[in-house]
Image: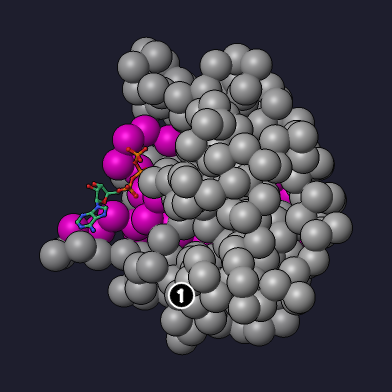
């Protein structure tokens, strides 16, 4: 975790720095002058009420949405706003969206082979470039997410949680430096949520993880750093305990009932 003495802009050890980011949709400011940073190998959560601008921030980081103002400095590359989405992926920022992106009729293993080849053409990946596939690497990552024994099963036969872990594994074989996850435990029961927490803790040896999340028990269990957003701006930042004790956070988010966090 980076501690910034009140000024995240000066964090020189950051993997990614958002500097004065604003995003407007038809004159509406969804994100308003956000400055924060993500350290290498940390699990950094973005929390806050619905519509606070959390997902929009992830969209900015992965290049899906271009901000109206600000800079996104990343690793030794500098400002990545000039890059296209696929170029940002190649630089090591990988995003898991809430919409599933596996090939449901293919096996877990074949999904991994496609991901490893950065080639979404099923036939190109499965047959023509076969000799380049790295089976050991695939099994090593499948083992990390607990799916190595299910490598031959079709993706559609996996449980909800297993599907999410497969998608995470498909990103991990690309060896990202920063993994972006949008509500990774949505729809999971307690056991799957806890397993996801253990997986993310292992992943952070390899890369930083930025997560948009509403499940506060999940946040508390693994967060290194938490940014609380409200109405497009940062309300406060700190450890999970620090932000949960913050009166403003309790007022605008935590104290508003479970339906807000669903
Ligand atoms: N493409 C878009 N066009 C217009 N408005 C948008 C667009 N994307 C997001 N917004 C608006 O921007 C605001 C922030 O949305 P965002 O999805 O980032 O919030 P969030 O904090 O992720 O919320 P949630 O927890 O509900 O996912 C919302 O008011 C939303 O309606």
Can residue 105 be seen?
Answer: yes
Percent across and percent down for residue 86 are: 49, 77
Mark 1, secondary structure of its residue: helix
Q: Is residue 143 above or below residue 260?
A: below
Percent across and percent down for residue 115 are: 61, 63
**From this viewpoint, which residue is outermost toward the front?**
127
- Residue 52 is one of the magenta-drawn residues: yes
Quick check: 218 left or right of 85?
right
Task: Identify which residue, 40 or 167, lies in the foreground.
Answer: 167
Residue drawn at x 43%, y 65% is 60
Quick check: 146 left or right of 211?
right
- Quadrant in the picture for residue 255: top left
The span shown in magenta is 28-57
Residue drawn at x 45%, y 24% is 187
Percent across and percent down for residue 38 are: 66, 57
Quick check: 152 left or right of 161?
right
Residue drawn at x 62%, y 78% is 128
Percent across and percent down for residue 220 are: 66, 26
Residue drawn at x 28%, y 55% is 30
Task: Identify which residue, 148 or 197, lies in the foreground.
Answer: 148
- Quadrant in the picture for residue 16: bottom right
Can residue 54 be seen?
Answer: no
Circle 1 residue: 85
Q: Is residue 94 above or below residue 74?
A: above
**From this viewpoint, which residue is outermost toward the left?**
26
Task: Identify which residue, 189 or 222, lies in the foreground.
Answer: 189
């Amino acid at each position: 975790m980076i501690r910034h003495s009140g000024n995240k802009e000066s964090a020189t050890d950051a993997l990614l720095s958002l500097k004065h980011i604003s995003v407007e949709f038809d004159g509406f400011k969804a994100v308003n002058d956000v400055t924060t940073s993500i350290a290498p190998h940390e699990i950094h959560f973005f929390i806050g009420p619905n519509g606070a601008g959390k997902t929009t921030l992830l969209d900015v980081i992965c290049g899906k949405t271009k901000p109206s103002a600000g800079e996104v400095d990343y690793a030794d590359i500098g400002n990545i706003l000039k890059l296209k989405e696929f170029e940002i992926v190649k630089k090591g920022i990988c995003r898991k969206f809430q919409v599933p992106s596996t090939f449901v009729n293919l096996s877990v293993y074949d999904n991994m082979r496609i991901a490893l080849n950065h080639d979404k053409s099923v036939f190109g990946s499965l047959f023509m470039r076969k000799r380049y596939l790295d089976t050991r690497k695939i099994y090593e990552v499948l083992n990390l997410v607990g799916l190595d024994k299910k490598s031959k099963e079709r993706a559609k036969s996996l449980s909800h949680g297993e599907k999410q872990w497969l998608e995470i594994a498909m990103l991990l074989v690309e060896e990202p430096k920063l993994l972006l996850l949008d509500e990774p435990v949505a729809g999971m029961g307690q056991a799957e949520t806890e397993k996801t927490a253990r997986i993310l803790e292992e992943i952070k040896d390899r890369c930083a993880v930025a997560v948009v999340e509403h499940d506060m028990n999940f946040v508390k269990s693994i967060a290194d750093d938490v940014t609380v957003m409200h109405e497009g701006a940062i309300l406060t930042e700190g450890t999970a305990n620090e932000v949960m004790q913050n009166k403003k956070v309790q007022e605008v988010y935590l104290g508003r009932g479970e339906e807000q966090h669903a």
